[in-house]
Each structure stands twice: as structure tokens, then as C-alpha cells.
């Protein structure tokens, strides 16, 4: 049965924020990192969950590329509507999974990661981008929570999320059997809402990338799913050395043998 979508549905706050000056800056910075990462990853199936305003699989050479979201939006046309903590996807069926800013807005981030581990193929890759609490962006979140504790308008997207520390996220991934292949940082400019302020602080991206990369506003993780298997058998090098060929000597001195020897 076909389902008719409500094309008059209002834009989600995430989509509205990504259209802002700060949101466009975030898209520009993250798109570069995703493009560089996915171009060298191969397989059969890839899925991007959320942030569909960014086509984070556009540089991927994987044939089957899908997009999913949990809300209906007139400006987005995903292949799948679902929650990221219960994916309607078969076990070990994805070679590449992308989670852009899903964990900090997930009601159960641990369950989201467990689902990611379940649906991924062994040696598959998981790409995660998230807001770094140890940055100017994290400081902005702290000040908003401190000054506007009961003001819902001041805590709109993305300041209504729970920023997860990089070290904490690495621990979660390790517990699920993921190996962190690489970590990069971006968005060193303060989270200003005006374009003019972004131009004034534009130098901080180059300065921060070189000297203060650890305090970037957004971290970008490439992780690989490792599966524990049987221990491979190693060859034994402590073997008895091979003896040289010996000439067979006669064990009896029969007339025929004596005659042969002579």
C-alpha cells in the first residue's frame, strides 16, 4: 500500500538551523571530511541516517546508497523512515554507515551504537560526526544551559542536544568491537549566527587546525567493525633439521653383495 506524504509538513528544527549562517558553515566544513573519507571505502550497501540536507554519500563509489530519517519533511525524500535506535535492517548487511550528529540527539545513544554494530558487516566502516563539548561550541552550550535553563526558545537545535565527549565515545566504540581508524576536527570558529562574525573569525579555522585541533567544535570519527575470530595457526619454526641424504649400505655380506661391491 502506497503512503502519501504530507507535503505541507513544517520544516524540522534541524533543517531550519542548517539553512542558517552557522548551519551552512557546519555543512561546508563537514562535507569536506565526509567526501574525503567515503571515496576510498568499498562494499555493496551504504546508509546515511539524518542530516539529509547534506549528501554525505555523494563521493562514495558504493553502488547501493540509502538515506533515512525519523521525521517527515517536505524538503527531504529519504528511502526509509525509521528511528536510529531500532533499525529495520537485517544483521550484517551494511558496509558503510554514517551517523552525522545522531548520538547527541538520540534518546538512547548506547542503543543507537548497538544497532549500528548489529547491522554492519565485519570490517565495515562507521562514520560519526558530533559536537565537541571541549570547544567553543561546548562552552556556548554550557552558557545557554546556565543562563536559559527554563527557556525552550534559547535551547533550540542544536543547543538542545547532549554533547558527548570524544574520549567517552571512543570507550563506547571499543566496548562494541569497533576500532577507531582516524579522528579529525573541524569548526574552530566560534558559533556565531551572523555571517559577518564568521568572516571576522575565519582565521581561527586555519590557526586551530594547525595548533589547536583538539578543541574543534566538531569531531569526525572513522571506525571499523572488528570481529573476534579463531586464532590463526602459526608455523612451527623449531623443527628438527633435515638430514642429508645417506648412501644405503648393505646390511648383509652375501656373495651377490660382495660381487656387486667389488
Image: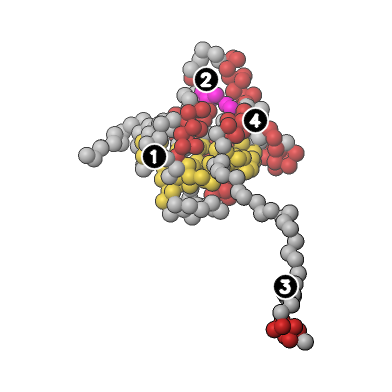
Q: Residue at x 72, y 85 (%)?
A: 260
Mark pair 3, 2: CA separation: 103 Å
Q: Residue at x 58, y 27 (%)?
A: 164
Mark 1 or mark 2, earlier in chain? 1
Do tag 1 and tag 4 residues touch (Cβ < 8 Å)? Answer: no
Residue 251 placement, left or right of 8: right
Mark pair 1, 2: CA separation: 37 Å
Q: Which residues are magenta?
A: 158-164
Mark 4 or mark 3, earlier in chain? 4
Mark number, residue 76: none
SS at mark 2 in the image: helix
Mark pair 4, 3: CA separation: 77 Å
Task: Give percent across and percent down for residue 79.
Answer: 36, 43
Image: 165 above or below 4: above
Classify the position of the N terminus by image quarter.
top left
> Dot 4: few (<14), some (14–19), or many (≥20) neighbours within 10 Å?
few
Q: Nearer the viewer, mark 2 or mark 4?
A: 4
Q: Residue at x 75, y 39 (%)?
A: 211
Q: Nearer the viewer, mark 1 or mark 4?
A: 1
Instruction: Give the image quarter of residue 21.
Output: top right
> Which residue in the protein does label 2 denote?
154
Q: Assess whether residue 162 is covered by the magenta stretch.
A: yes
Residue 15 placement, left or right of 185: left
Mark number, residue 251: 3
SS at mark 3 in the image: loop
Mark 3 or mark 2, earlier in chain? 2
> Which residue in the protein does label 4 denote?
167
Amino acid at each position: 500500500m502506497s503512503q502519501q506524504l504530507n507535503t505541507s509538513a513544517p520544516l524540522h528544527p534541524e533543517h531550519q538551523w542548517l539553512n542558517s549562517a552557522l548551519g551552512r558553515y557546519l555543512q561546508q566544513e563537514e562535507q569536506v571530511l565526509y567526501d574525503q573519507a567515503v571515496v576510498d571505502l568499498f562494499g555493496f550497501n551504504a546508509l546515511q541516517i539524518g542530516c539529509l540536507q547534506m549528501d554525505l554519500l555523494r563521493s562514495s563509489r558504493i553502488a547501493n546508497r540509502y538515506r533515512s530519517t525519523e521525521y517527515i519533511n517536505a524538503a527531504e525524500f529519504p528511502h526509509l523512515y525509521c528511528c536510529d535506535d531500532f533499525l529495520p535492517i537485517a544483521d550484517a548487511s551494511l558496509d558503510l554507515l554514517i551517523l552525522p550528529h545522531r548520538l547527541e540527539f538520540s534518546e538512547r545513544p548506547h542503543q543507537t551504537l548497538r544497532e549500528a554494530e548489529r547491522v554492519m558487516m565485519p570490517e565495515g566502516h562507521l562514520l560519526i560526526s558530533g559536537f565537541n563539548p571541549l570547544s567553543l561550541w561546548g562552552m556556548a552550550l554550557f552558557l545557554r544551559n546556565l543562563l536559559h535553563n527554563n527557556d525552550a526558545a534559547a535551547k533550540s537545535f542544536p543547543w538542545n542536544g547532549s554533547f558527548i565527549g570524544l574520549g567517552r565515545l571512543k570507550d563506547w566504540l571499543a566496548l562494541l568491537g569497533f576500532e577507531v581508524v582516524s579522528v579529525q576536527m573541524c569548526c574552530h570558529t566560534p558559533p556565531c549566527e551572523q555571517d559577518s562574525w564568521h568572516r571576522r573569525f575565519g582565521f581561527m579555522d586555519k590557526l586551530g587546525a594547525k595548533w589547536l585541533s583538539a578543541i574543534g567544535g566538531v569531531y569526525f570519527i572513522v571506525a571499523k567493525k572488528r570481529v573476534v575470530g579463531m586464532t590463526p595457526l602459526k608455523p612451527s619454526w623449531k623443527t628438527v633439521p633435515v638430514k642429508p641424504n645417506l648412501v644405503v649400505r648393505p646390511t648383509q655380506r652375501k656373495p651377490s653383495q660382495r660381487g656387486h661391491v667389488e
